[in-house]
Image: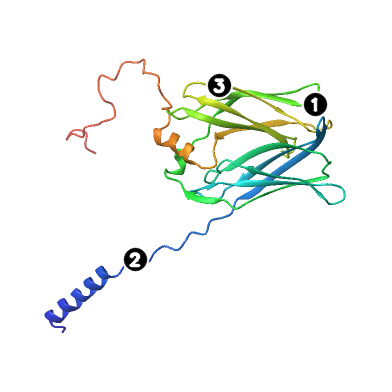
Amino acid sequence: MIPRSRMFAALALILVAGCSSTAEEPSTQQMQPLALKEQASSVAKGDGGYVVSWAGVLGNSNPWHFGENVVATIVGIDAKGAEVLRMDQPLDAVPPSGTLAFTGQAVTGAKPERVTITHRSAQWRQVARIPSSLRKFPVSRVQTIKQKDGTYLVTGDVGNPYVLPASSLTVSALLRDRSGKLLGGASTFVDDVRAGKTPRFILTVEGLPASTQVARTEVVARTWGSTGRPYEELAVGGAVPVHTVKPSTPPFAKDRGRYAVTAENKP
């Protein structure tokens, strides 16, 4: 039998050891790099040279981090293999477990036969709110009309699901064929988007070949800026309640959600 004094002494040593030991610092989380999920480009002859248009979609598989300060690099190569276009395009922040649609356009003197899009590594920042608070900006009444000059006019309305006004939103339209393949796109900005208001946006997609067959248009809206702070500031202010209409029926005379168990109705 172990003496009681020795048992207490051993227990004290265990408690002291437990209090003096420190938890191991968590290892640095390995972030998954951004992935260029889709890209498309087109080249058209213009007045000042060749107009190069592009569109792409970046994906962020990290559920708790923004991909910030991302820069895309667009390179055009001519028939002889010479570089005739190189342009760095700063992009908006890529939300956690989300995607970023981006578009752009540039003019070059020589015709590129091949256009590629790459991107630099993102700077990662953990989201300050739960990711579910980052709601999508609703887009409605989207119309795509092909013009006589071969361009596509895209119009629609954009809303704000948050209480605070969004100072500036980027609206991007992606044109796709019947199989869903990305064909091209364009972007515009809508300022001072307030809750309950749905301002109109208008943009034009240029440079697509005459044989292009557009089957559908995907329109997405997001906060403008290389970091996710504008998005988070809206989330901190809270979302607009879904049900804002006052009930028109009178309240129940007796709360039917409660049932008193008495001796008569016991099972």
Residue 17 position within the rendered picture, expressed as x and y whole percent measured from the top left? 25, 73
Question: Label 3 neighbourhood size at 10 Å, few (<14), some (14-19), many (20+)?
Answer: some
Q: Residue at x 67, y 37 (%)?
A: 103
Query: Of residues 218 and 71, which is closer to you in this image?
Result: 71
Label 3: state its secondary structure: loop
Query: Residue at coordinates 31% horizontally, 67% vertically from top-left?
Result: 22
The numbered dot on residue 199 is: 3
Q: Return the residue at label 1.
A: 150
5 or 21, which is in the foreground?
21
Q: Can see residue 237?
A: yes
Q: Is residue 118 above or below residue 220?
A: below
Looking at numbered disc 3 in the image, what kind of residue is underneath it? Answer: Pro
Q: Position of residue 174 (x, y in %)?
A: 68, 34
The residue tagged with tag 2: helix, strand or loop?
loop
Distance (Cα) linking label 3 and label 2: 52 Å
First in residue order: circle 3 vs circle 2: 2
| Viewer-closest of 258 and 114 | 114
The residue sitting at 58% across, 23% down in the picture is 157
Q: Amino acid at mark 1?
A: Gly
The kind of residue on which mark 2 rests is Ala
**From mark 1 to mark 2, how far is it between C-alphas?**
64 Å
Give the residue number, with chain letter if any, for mark 2: 23
